[in-house]
Structure formats: structure tokens, C-alpha cells
Amino acid sequence: MKITYVGHSCFLIENEEGGKIVFDPYKPGSVPGYADIGIAADEIVISHGHGDHSGDLYVDKAEPAYDKEFQIGKIRTFHDDVRGADRGRNNISIVTIDGKRVVHMGDIGCDLTQGELDILMNCDVLMIPVGGYYTIGARQAFEMCNRINPKVIIPMHYRGRGFGYLEIGGKEPFLNYFAMTDRPVISAGSEISDLPEGKCVLSMEPLRIL
């Protein structure tokens, strides 16, 4: 499994057979500091309709095309803590890739029910927003990760030097919560070809920064 962190909440994953799936591609100009996504995929997964997550028209078709289907599940949640009254719905996506469960939380802005946690628990990869304001923030994301107990955690939807919305925070407060735990934080670039051994937080760097 190859994972590329394109930026913001957009990830491109390629399976062992060459099939490519992209999560939450952003529209050009929708997120400060990011270049156009410039990627190709066989399947596109979108958590909700906001422009920084719904740039499906700007994703090219992969060549050669993957002739199988990805197994994709959804959990309908909310973009806020008032049952969607402020920012609407959000979908959590669960995709099985090379026998591993990959969970993309989208712009989750609410707590999870026990039934939802039961579905997500012990997944292999969890991609979770940590910047706050539009989504859950660092503390709530940390607590959610502890309850889900994934193997690999990848923070997303945060602000860094020269990129991201001014209203949201960086990933450092989220990462700092793990300093007193036995889950190490591993720094990585924009791409990884294999998942790390053991449980960890994988701090990836966006690929498409201007």
C-alpha cells in the first residue's frame, strides 16, 4: 500500500495491484497555499460537498484503468456539534485496501456514538482532522483516536507554514498529546510505501504546497 498525502484532507492510496483511490480532493484555489492537486485515480471518495473536499472534477482518470472495485463503506455523521445545523453532514469513509481497513474521517465535527466506534475500532489506518474550528480540534481528536485505537494515525486538515486556513490550528498540539503515551510520533515525507511496524502517529508533509 502506497499512501501519498496530497494536502489538506486529500490522500491518494495505491494498492498492490496498481489501483488508485483518492479521498477528498480539493478544488483549485479553495485552500490557501496549495497548488492544484494534479493527480489521477480510479476511484474518488468525497466526505461532503464543500469546495476544499469535493474537487472530483479536477482528478484525472488513472491510466491504465484498474478493473476491480474498492470496498467502500460509509458512516453518516455531522460537520459540527449541532447535528449539521451549522455546516451540514459529513461522511466517514471506510475502505479495505490490501486487506487493511483505512478510515478517512472527513470533516468530522461531532462525537461518535458507541455503535460508530464499534465499527471503526482497531482499524489499520485512521486519517483524522486536528486543526479545529471547522472540525474537531486537537484534544477531541486525541481522545477519539484513543477510543478507536487504530494501528496508524495520520493527522490532516491543519495549518502549516504558508498553507491552510488561518482559522485552524497546526498539527503540533495534537502531536504533543502523544508525548506521554507509548505511541511514537514518526515524521515522514509526502509518501510512504509501507505502513510502519506497530502502533504510531505518522506525521506526513503535504505534497502540493505552493
Image (cartoon, helix red, strand yellow):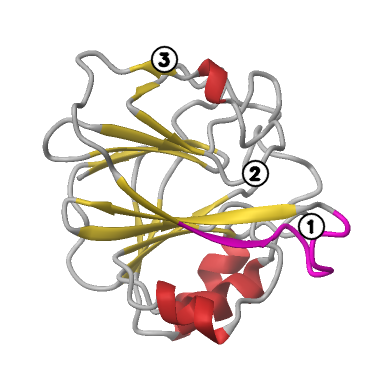
In this view, the mark in front (1 or 3): 3
**Location of residue 46 in the rendering, given as x and y in whole percent from the top left corner:** 54, 40
Instruction: Tell me if residue 71 comes above or below residue 117 in the rendering.
Output: above
Query: How much space separates mark 1 and mark 3, taking CA atoms?
Result: 31 Å
Q: Which residues are magenta?
A: 74-86
Camera sees residue 141: yes
Residue 75 falls inside the magenta stretch:
yes
Residue 164 falls inside the magenta stretch:
no
**Tag of residue 133:** 1
Q: Amino acid at mark 2?
A: His
| Residue nearer the viewer, 117 or 169 | 117
The residue indicated by pointer 3 is: 60
Q: How many numbered marks does the figure carry? A: 3
- Answer left or right for 5 relative to 28: left
The residue indicated by pointer 2 is: 48
Q: Residue at x 41, y 85 (%)?
A: 181
- Answer left or right for 80 relative to 34: right
In this view, the mark in front (2 or 1): 2
Camera sees residue 170: no
